Amino acid sequence: MEAVNLRNVGHSIPKIDGLSIATGKPAYTEDLAMPHALVLKILRSPHAFAKIISIDTSKAERVEGVECILTYKDVPKVRFTLAGQSYPEPSPYDRMILEGVVRYVGDEVAIIAAVDEKTALKAMKLINVEYEVLEPVLDFEKAIGHPSVVHFEEDLTCNFDIGLHKEQNIVSSHEQAVGDVEKVLKDCEFVVEDVYYPQAQAHAMMETYRSFTYQDYMGRLVVVSSTQVPFHIKRQLARALQIPATKIRVIKPRIGGGFGGKQTGAGDVFAALVTLRTGKPAMIIYDRQETFSCTTSRHAMRIKVRLGADADGFIRAIDLEVLSDTGAYGEHASTVLSCVGEYTLPLYNKTKAVRIRGNAVYTNKMPAGAFRGYGATQGTFALESAVNKLAERLAIDPTEVRLKNISQKGETFLTGHGVQLGSTALDRCIKKGREMIGWKEKFPRQTLSGTKVRGVGMAITMQGSGIANIGTASAEIRLTDDGNFALLIGATDMGTGCDTILSQIAAEVLEVPLDKIYVSAGDTDTSPFDPGSYASSTTYLAGTAVLKAAEELKGKILDQGAKFLGASKENVIFEELSVRRIDGEGEISLAKIAEQTILGMGNLQLAAMATHGSQISPPPYVAGFAEVEVDVETGKVDLIDYVAVVDCGTMINPNLARIQAEGGIVQGIGMALFEEVRYSNLGKMETNTFMQYKIPCRQDVGNVRIAFEESYEPSGPFGAKSIGEVVANTPPPAIVNAVYNAVGVQVHHLPVTAEKVFLEMLKQQ
Amino acid sequence: MQIELTVNDKLVTWDVENDEFLADTLRAHGFLSVKKACDTSCCGLCTVWMDGKPILSCSILAMRAHGKKITTIEGVSQAAEEFARILTAEGAEQCGFCSPGFIMNVLAMKNELDNPTEDEIIHYLTGNLCRCTGYMGQLRAVKTYLGVA
Ligand code: FES
Ligand code: FES
């Protein structure tokens, strides 16, 4: 459908839930929990790697108000993954609910359920655990071949061959090569080689992980969870708890941010187990420390890049070698690893050979998991830093190097299995961005005074829209008895606004005002299947499912209306909430159609259901430009201005797209300048509060300016592609490049701190 | 112990523990707009007013509210909604978890500052973290609300 003369799509309609949640109406998991639910606390391992020799819970159990204490002896002996991915998951089944081995500081040892938090904490202190402490694997660069093996158990399994070699601490090996990289590199006039270390980053969503469980009147387990993936949580629980999936219902209320973190299960399984054991409602709320240190983070990586270009500045070869730290469990290990190449190699298309090789390794640290950007963020940092370096070697403006080499519409990619690029406005994004930032005047640096130097830097990036051939989404729309529409979706709004956006699409197709539609979403009992909101899939995949369902339903309404009017379908139209004969000889309102079909003798509720999956995953693009000011006496870096120009195809809701972009850019700024998950040399996380782990506050981010260059993606709903993830990727390389252009310091280890810049400047003198 | 206080213009008498924080007390009594997102007084999500001044309810013992006037967003619903409309029109609330505390601080700022500059606005609101929106949209909304450029 073309994006012309639209009444809903393309309009900045406020989020349909916005007013309620902004003014604090009860809408989140904790708000909905029953007042007398048992409170859960988790006893966690103080050691990075240890075997449990004995656990004595007897004293703790005698504390008044303690309902139950569960240890590894009380859980099914079955391994599963917390990764919320479509079945069969590519993550290894390498964990149990509780186990006699603990693999990181914070790993779960016992579950305490009590009448209130104080009692649970009191009981927790009375549990006596004896450990045999093992030598942990802490440095991910030393994990392969380390004398300690993080997962030595025999019963670890994988659904696929992901290249797991657990005896070497390798979770997954990946290699993809097209052409002969070594040979092409040898023929290149210019070769750049460098190594980059994107760090572990914490999601730091404002609502910490939480879950509330109870058994309903039929004995089914109901799980109200702050999750992005209700259907995956249901499947996960069925396996972990060894109960039939039909006995489980997962409900996702409003959630206070996810960013990929809530694509991995957290406390659900513990609360569910307690409810099954006790028959009582239970609630688990991770505190901020647990959220920082006992869930997941972005995968820290080491990425070696080799880039080759010919004398004309065409990039002919890209070679990436990746080492990814997946921590103690392998959630998302193989897929994040492969996405490093998947979402970077097709950026440039004058290449003759490209390759990505790498390993994801187990270490005795908190697991890594899904995080907005999903490998593309790390890959973009490495590749774009190297491209900036190449531009300098070539003595060509970095924006021109990009314009020369980027992929064009209609092209295919070396790694792309023959799929043509359906849409791109990346060239326009680059041109617009450099204009907005004032590139011509400011590149590479301006000296403001003896102590302050400003530099500009840039980077480009892409992502996907959904997962080709795997991601699917379903939607159902019903004409309700009162002449309105119920939109049932499995997509999970986590603040992104998808409930609104999908309603806009439905309203557009059905040609009704938005307020004629209500949304029911994120309940595995009533929603049609949707894997959940991740992989930048909701607008593109669920949007298309909604569009298809709406088209089908509209056809049915016209059919039915025509019948009532004694006309053929070709001779009626739908306008102003009525089906009308073209000859003006009669009309019937939607409300009347509803009444006559659903009520009385109509015996027909009009509804349509559609499922959509895509064989392609069209990339959205961003060109990002940073201007920084560096204090040469201290190395302090201030971000002055950040410009991001985005091609997300058609914007279904421009304001919501803008906020997605601003939020993603600021998360990227955090990664570039402030954020780092750090461990002590014993493997204890040091950055487990907002005191030690700094996310950007209002004063840290300078000015962030977003512009859009729309393209039209033929395979997307109304020409839309995704936006959620792609916006997180450019700040690290662009800011690092800006600092380099200002003071000549190339930072390889994120984040860019004053210390790093200052020490490097000292070395240069 | 027992405390007597005014919550949103109603006099109440509550039993509280000696070590109980006001945010938990308020939630326990059904003021579910009050959110918490840290245990280190860093995030500002728990902001309510005590005698008209914004405070972090997570860091104030409930007993210190004895004899005070506490206001949550439920108690200023009209003003809150007026600003929330501007905020949502800007698209600048995403998950919304940070919004009630943020709005309480915006309303307090409006009472406290005349014609604040952009820097003053940012300074006043710095204690309110938001992980979703990147702050720019919130700033646009605040400026619209205050009628400053
Ligand atoms: S909950 Fe974070 S400051 Fe109060
Ligand atoms: S809107 Fe989610 S934290 Fe602010």
Image (cartoon, rainbow, N blue to C red):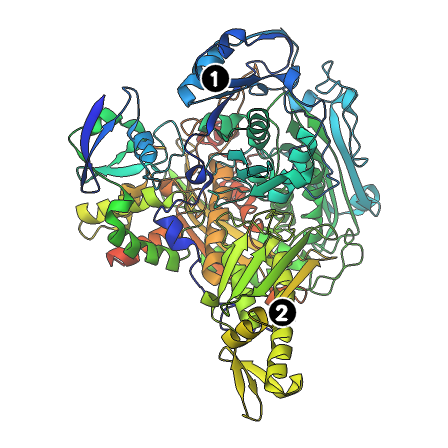
Which secondary structure, mark 2? loop
Which residue type carries mark 2?
A: Asn
Could you say which disc has been placed on residue A66 in the image? 1
Residue that badge 2 annotates:
A603
Q: Quadrant of residue A408?
A: bottom right
Q: Quadrant of ligand 2?
A: top left
Q: Percent from the top left, x then y, of residue A667?
A: 49, 42
Which quarter of the rendered picture does the C terminus of chain B lie within? bottom left
Q: Is residue A147 above or below residue B85?
A: above
Same chain for mark 2 and mark 1? The answer is yes
Front residue (pair A754, A264): A264
Q: Secondary structure at mark 1?
A: strand
Observer able to see residue A261? no
A354 to the left or right of B76? right
Looking at numbered disc 1 in the image, what kind of residue is underneath it?
Val
Furthest-left residue in view?
Answer: B67
Judging from the image, mark 1 belongs to the subunit labelled: A
Horizontal and vertical percent position of residue A15: 44, 57
**Toward the viewer: B132 or B84?**
B84
- From this view, report whether residue A587 is shown above or below residue B44: below
Viewer-nearest of discs 2 and 1 = 2
Q: How many marks?
A: 2
Can residue A24 be seen in the rendering of this structure?
Answer: yes
Question: Is A623 placed left or right of B10 in the picture?
Answer: right
Q: Quadrant of residue A222?
A: top right
Which residue sits at x=47%, y=37%? A673
Badge 2 local density, few (<14 within 10 Å), some, or many (20+)? few
The image shows residue A295 at horizontal and vertical percentages of 56, 30
In the figure, is residue B73 to the left or right of A487? left
